[in-house]
Amino acid sequence: GKGGKAAAAQAEEGGFDGKGRAPASLTLSVAVSEGGAGDIVVGVGDDATELAAAFAGRHGLEGAQVPLLAEEVRRTLVEVQAMEIEQLRLERDRGAARVAALSEAHGEVMRDGGSAVATRYALRLADAEHAAAARAREEREAAEAAAAAAR
């Protein structure tokens, strides 16, 4: 039922809704008759077999269908949880990379009292000015060569 370890952990974090239920992890739509369907709402700590049995009872399904339905609930829940875990890993890795970059920049500023930032800016500016001067010199030389060839 609704009392597993995961539900207890959720309760400690204040994750229950106002009715004492853990929030739904997923809602699984199940075809019950031609053109008809019903939903199985799966919450943290729910037992797949209990959910399947309750659903079968509500919709007049045969008891033999309960194990198949329970297995589908479990499989779907595992897939959803795997996607959530992968998403959390990606967010963690992005966050770690950002923290490392910010820490490095912060360390440089703290070590050099801000002079490293000013120095990098000055070097970038000098590189940009040098590149612009080199382009202007190349253009001037090309124009002089063209003028000399035209004479």
Image (spheres, rainbow, N blue to C red):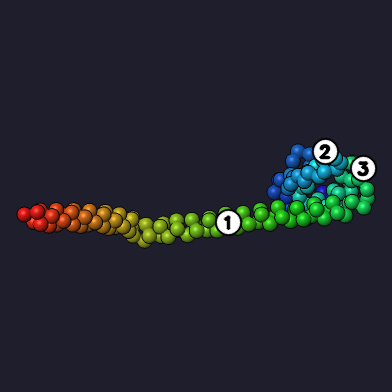
Which residue is identified by label 3?
Answer: 60
Pointer 1 with pointer 3, Cβ within 8 A: no
The disc label shown at residue 35, or none: 2
Where is residue 63 drawn, in percent x and y?
93, 50
Q: Amino acid at mark 2?
A: Gly
Q: Amino acid at mark 1?
A: Leu
**Which mark sits nearer the N-terminus, 3 or 2?**
2
Give the residue displayed 82% in from the left and 49% down from the top.
2
**Which mark sits nearer the N-terminus, 2 or 1?**
2
Residue at the extreme left: 151
In the foreground, 93 or 130: 130
The disc label shown at residue 68, or none: none
| Count of numbered circles in the view | 3
Q: CA distance from mark 2 to mark 1?
A: 40 Å
Where is residue 46 drawn, in percent x and y?
81, 50
Q: Nearer the viewer, mark 3 or mark 2?
A: 2
Which residue is identified by label 1?
Answer: 90
User: Taking the image as drawn, is residue 115 in sight?
Assistant: no
Where is residue 75 drawn, in percent x and y?
77, 55
Q: Is residue 63 left or right of residue 123?
A: right
